[in-house]
Amino acid sequence: MRLALILCTTLSLAAQPPAERAVTAVLDDWHRAAAQADEGRYFGHFAEGAVFLGTDPGERWTKAAFRAWAQPYFQRGRAWSFKATRREITLSKDGHTAWFDEDLDTPNLGPARGTGVLAQEQGRWRIEQYSLSIPIPNALTKAVQAQIEALAKKP
């Protein structure tokens, strides 16, 4: 089964244009770096002006602020583990900007979604913005909305 998954992944990557393969490689390595608690490699994939949007409404992090917040997780030897189960990549006409969305398998959040933008800087793809979210099925929206509104009303 594992061999079949590797073969399917390899074949689907081979079918991608080179720029999409490069973006895929960056995002996959970025997720692996977090799972391996490699802080330097993880944050090395961000552009200097990058922004990370977390799942909480107040989580809009600059690269430096996100790194400061995340550092204790990396120092303990494990940060977080996100595995893309589906990803779509769109390239700009000039091929120097990529937009993507991905479905994620995560042990702590459950099913999640990431979206973002990468840009080429001196021939290297870097993450400019990443937005992490927890998709809420439409059937649960009213209940979740009520919980959010009740929480907002608390002093």
Image (cartoon, helix red, strand yellow):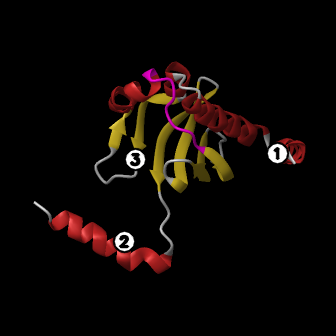
Q: Is residue 74 above or below residue 60?
A: above
**SS of the residue at dot 3?**
loop
Give the left or right position of residue 90, taking residue 40 as reference: right
What's the CA distance linking mark 3 and mark 1?
28 Å
What is the three-letter code of the residue carrying label 1? Thr
Give the left or right position of residue 54, taking residue 42 as reference: left
Q: Is residue 119 above or below residue 114?
A: above
Q: Residue furthest left?
A: 155
Give the left or right position of residue 32, taking residue 145 as reference: right
User: Residue, x 44% and y 21% (percent of image)?
Assistant: 75
Q: Marks 2 and 1: in contact by CB < 8 Å?
A: no
Q: Residues within 10 Å of mark 1 (few under 14, many from 20)?
A: few
What's the CA distance linking mark 3 and mark 2?
18 Å
What is the three-letter code of the residue carrying label 2? Val
What is the three-letter code of the residue carrying label 3? Gly
In the picture, the disc for residue 54 is: 3
Q: How many marks?
A: 3
Residue marked by disc 2: 144
Q: Quadrant of the C terminus?
A: bottom left
What's the CA distance linking mark 1 and mark 2?
35 Å
Would you say the magenta stretch is mainly helix, strand or loop? Answer: loop
**SS of the residue at dot 1?**
helix
Q: Is residue 142 above or below residue 148?
A: below
Residue marked by disc 1: 9
In terms of sequence position, does the residue under pointer 1 or pointer 2 come before the other? 1
Which percent across, then down, holds residue 107?
55, 47
Which percent across, then down, holds residue 33?
58, 28
User: Residue, x 43% and y 29% (percent of image)?
Assistant: 73
Q: Which residues are magenta?
A: 75-82
Q: Marks 2 and 3: in contact by CB < 8 Å?
A: no
Residue 45 magenta: no
In the picture, the disc for residue 43 is: none
